Amino acid sequence: MSTEISNKPYKVLNRDTIKYIAMFTMLLNHIATVFLTPGTWLFELFLAIGYFTAITMIYFLVEGYHYTHSRKTYLSRLFLFALISEVPYCLAFTTKGVIEFYGLNMLFTLCVCFGILYVLDTAKSKLAKVCLVILGIIISLFCDWALLAPIFTLLFVWAGNSEYRTKIAFCLSILIFGAFNFLGGLGRFSLAANMLYALLSVIGMGMAAICIVYFYNGKRTEKGKTFSKWFFYLFYPVHLLILAVLRLVFIG
């Protein structure tokens, strides 16, 4: 996806650097969700910054689908860590008691999006593609970033290697996400406050768009490739488990 835009001098961020930023912003989002009081400025700020992560993960999933050496291995590894992460995910975000089902975690969402990519790539008929993509969208309703993640995936597939289309894909994703938040805020805030809430909610996604469109060079890090790859997979369940333990100790 990035071949067209990788040779400009200001493209200084590689894929791994952006992913490290995404891990940090996700941590802020999850700290807010578990420990901070909804409606406070710090809660809303951490939550908004954390939205950097999901769209970044989806962008790199679409990119990785086309460049991976083995799609089977890629999906198997993603699904394995989704399974490993599910109990820590539910433990971390349970609001009453020790554990309750909180939905399927983001790695399951990425598995669904991977399935959509596979369908678009291999299905023979348009009808089969449409039906299976709709099925994937329905399955996503049980996952984190329901509906939105498949929509973002389809937009990035449409964008392909075009920088212009990638900008449009990010802008549409941000508009759709902002609209979702605006609709979610109806009845909770005044009209002016709700518009401000919707605008602030897209800060993280806007940051992701800027990083990828204007500063991503299309390359991986030269050093520590293996470390980075496994760090990104392990960070998700490990940080959720730590948050879960802290929640149980300090909140109960």
Image (cartoon, grey):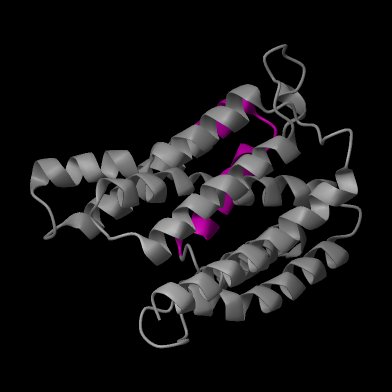
Please report the residue visible at 87 percent of the width from the left and 44 percent of the height from the top: 225
Q: Is residue 214 left or right of residue 177?
A: right
> Is 33 within the magenta?
no
Q: Is residue 44 above or below residue 118?
A: above
Dominant secondary structure of the residues highlighted in magenta in the image: helix
Q: Quadrant of the N terminus?
A: top right
Q: Is residue 213 visible?
A: yes
> Is 157 within the magenta?
yes
Q: Is residue 187 left or right of residue 91?
A: left
Q: Quadrant of residue 49?
A: top left
Please report the residue visible at 20 percent of the width from the left and 56 percent of the height from the top: 185
Q: Quadrant of residue 126?
A: bottom right
> 91 or 191, which lies in front?
91
In the rendered structure, which segment of residues is drawn in magenta?
A: 147-168
> 248 or 118, which lies in front?
248
Q: Is residue 68 above or below residue 37?
A: above
Please report the residue visible at 24 percent of the width from the left and 59 percent of the height from the top: 184
Image position, residue 248 (x, y; %): 47, 79
Image position, residue 169 (x, y; %): 52, 38
Q: Outermost residue, top direction?
A: 9
